[in-house]
Image (cartoon, rainbow, N blue to C red):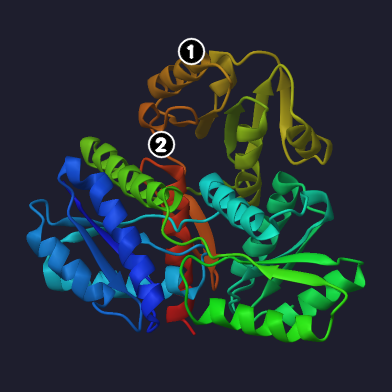
Amino acid sequence: MSALVIAGHGTRIGRGQEACKALIDRVRGMLAPEGVEVHDGYVELTDPPIDDAVAEAIVSDSDKHVVVVPLMIGTGGHVREDIPEAYTAGARRGGGSVSYAPHLGPDPRLRAAARERIAEAMGEWTSEETTVIFLGRGTSLTEANADHVRLGRVLREEGGYAEVVNGFIQVASPDLTTALNQAHGQGARRIVVMPHYLFPGRLEDWAHEQTEAWARNHPDAEVRVARVIGDCDALAEIVVDRYRDAVQARQGQTAETPVYLSGLVLRDRKVVIAGGGRVAARRVGKLVAAGANVEVVAPELGERMAGFVADGLVTHIAGQIAEAHLDGAWYVLACTDSPEVNAQVVEWATAERIFCVRSDDGASGTAWTPATGVADGMVVGVVGSGDPHVSAASRTVAVAAVAASRR
C-alpha cells in the first residue's frame, strides 16, 4: 500500500505546530485500518523537510511509491513549484515514485468548516446583518488570488451574509485594513473577519492585530475575528480522500496498457463529435485552434455549441450519429448522453482504424484527451491518471515548472 506524505507549510509558532500534528494524527488514525503509513514534511520552518519525508517514506514502503497531499488551501507557489521540486528530489534519493494529489481547494467540506467558524464568531448576530471579510493569504500568482475571490462569492451565496468582502493579509490587494474600510463604507456595522487559513500562526496573529487596530478607530462598528479552520474531521477527511483518489488513479493507470503520447496534426482534417452538449462543447475550442474541420452530429445543441455553429466554427449535422458520419474522419469523439451510443461510436471508429475518445468511459476508447496548458509557446500535456482532477492538477504543476525553467 502506498505511503502518504502530508506536505505542510511549516511554522515556528508552537500552537500552529501542535494543531498541524493533531491533524496528521487524526489522518493517521483514519488510515490505520488500511495499513497506510502516514508521514509529514514541510516547505519551511518545521522539520522534516518534504524531500526527507518522501525519501524515508519510499524506503519504508513495499511498493516504493508514495502519495504526496499538499496541505494547502490554494494553488500558490508552494503547490506549483516548491513541493514538486522537493518530492522530486526525495523520490530520486529514495529510488521510488510519487503521485501528487490536488491541493485541498474549494472542497464543499472546507467551505462548510469556514461557515461554522463564521457562525461561532457571529454568536447572536444573524447572517443577514453580518458582513464577512474573507481573508486569504495572498500570493504573487494572479490565478491563486482569483480562486480566493471566487470562493468568497460562493461563500456569500451559501452563507446568506449581507456581504462578503475579499481581502489578503500579504502580497495581494486589498489588504485587511482596506477591506474593512470598504465594508464600513458600504454601511456594515457588524463584521466578522474570517482568516481562511488551516492552522494558527503568524497570519492569524496579523489578522487579529490589524483588526483590533482598525476597530479602535471605528467605535461605531463591532468586529469579531473567527477561528482558522484548524484540526477537524472535515479537513482530515479531505486529506484522506485526496490520498485514496490518487491511489485509485494509479491502480487504474497501471492496470491498463500505458498510452503513447503524441501530438495530432489536424489542420484541414475532418473531426467528428457525437453529441452537442456541454461535454462536447468543452472539446471544440482546442480542435478549432488546431485547424480541424469539426462536424458535430447531434439531434439538438446546447447553448455553447449552438454558439460555435452560429459563429461558423463547426458544422452541425442534425440527427442521431450513424456509421456513415465517420467516413473520411481522422479523429472521433463520442460525447453523447447515452453510454450505449458512445460504445457504438467507438466500435464503428475502431473498425475503421480511427482513434476515438469516449467521454463517459475513457478506458473504453482508443484515445485519451490530455489536460493541456501553454508555457512560453510550448504545449504541455498530461494524460493517463484515470482521474481528470488529478490530471488537471498535474498539468498546472507541469506548466508552472516549464515556465519557471525558461525564466
Number of the label disc, if any, that sits on residue 340: 1
Say which residue appears at 46% left-offset and 68% top-offset: 199
Which residue, as the protein is rendered here, is positioned at the far front? Answer: 124
Q: Quadrant of residue 132?
A: bottom right
What x and y, as percent, mark residue 72? 45, 64
* Mark 1 closeness class: few <14, some 14–19, many ≥20 residues within 10 Å: few
* Residue 367: image tag: 2
Asked if 38 appears above or below 133 in the picture, the reply is above
Of pointers 1 and 2, the one earlier in the residue sequence: 1
- The answer to whether 352 is drawn above or below residue 267 in the figure is above
- Residue 53 position (above or below residue 353): below
Give, as a three-letter code, the residue at label 2.
Answer: Ala
Question: Is 18 left, or right, of 178 in this rendering?
Answer: left
Tag 1 secondary structure: helix
Instruction: Write the residue at 48% across / 75% down.
Output: 77
Q: Give the number of marks.
A: 2
Q: CA distance from mark 1 to mark 2?
A: 18 Å
Q: Which of label 1 and label 2 is nearer to you?
A: 1
- Residue 197 seen in render: yes
